[in-house]
Amino acid sequence: MLKLSESARKELEAFFSDKPKSTVRIYLAPGGCSGPHLGLALDEANDDDKVIEEGGFTFCASQGLWDQIGGVSIDLSYMGFTLEPDNPLPGGGGSCSSGCCGSCGSCGH
């Protein structure tokens, strides 16, 4: 299950307002915030991914990661997007801010 807060949805709408919508990948990033954390990036889905439509956006994550986290809640804070997995991450990580999609330009687009 993927939960997208209204504030996160509005931020994604603002980011894509002048460009075509791309798939947003949820991925496991090493280090930072007390260990591994979930992040966001623009990427195309592949055959090994679980693809979810939510709030008018397409999200993808590897099926293996999805099996580990069980789901995710995406919200927005003053530091950018926050991703909170339903199940604890391996290695003791938890939620962390992700700078994707306009917050600090880490999307590479």
Image (cartoon, rainbow, N blue to C red):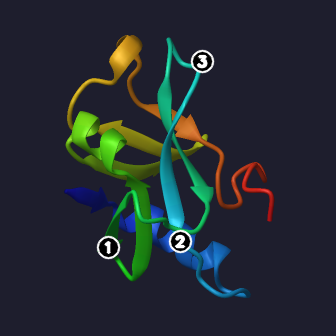
Q: CA separation, marks 2 and 3?
A: 24 Å
Secondary structure beneath disc 2? loop
The image shows residue 88, relative to residue 77, as above or below, that is above
Do the numbered discs 2 and 3 sit on residues whose CB atoms are within 8 Å? no
The image shows residue 99, relative to residue 107, as above or below, that is above
Residue 83 place in picture, x, y as percent: 41, 42
Can you tell which of label 2 and label 1 is closer to the viewer?
2
* Residue closer to the observer: 63 or 5: 63
* Residue closer to the observer: 79 or 2: 2
Quarter of the picture holding the N terminus: bottom left
* Residue closer to the observer: 59 or 49: 49
Res. 48 image quadrant: bottom left
Q: What residue type is labelled 3?
A: Gly
Secondary structure beneath disc 3? loop
Which residue position is annotated with label 3?
Answer: 31
Q: Is residue 14 left or right of residue 33?
A: right
Q: What residue type is labelled 1?
A: Glu
- Quick one: label 1 or label 3, which is nearer the N terminus? 3
Q: CA separation, marks 1 and 3?
A: 28 Å
Q: In this view, does 68 lie to the left or right of 91?
A: left
Q: Is residue 81 left or right of residue 68?
A: right
Q: What residue type is labelled 2?
A: Thr
**Which residue is pictured at 61% across the width and 40% down the height?**
79
**Which residue is pictured at 35% across the width and 19% down the height?**
90
In the image, which disc is placed on residue 54? 1
- Quick one: label 2 or label 3, which is nearer the N terminus? 2
Quarter of the picture holding the C terminus: bottom right
Which residue position is annotated with label 2?
Answer: 23
Q: How many labels does the image show?
A: 3
Q: CA separation, marks 2 and 1?
A: 11 Å
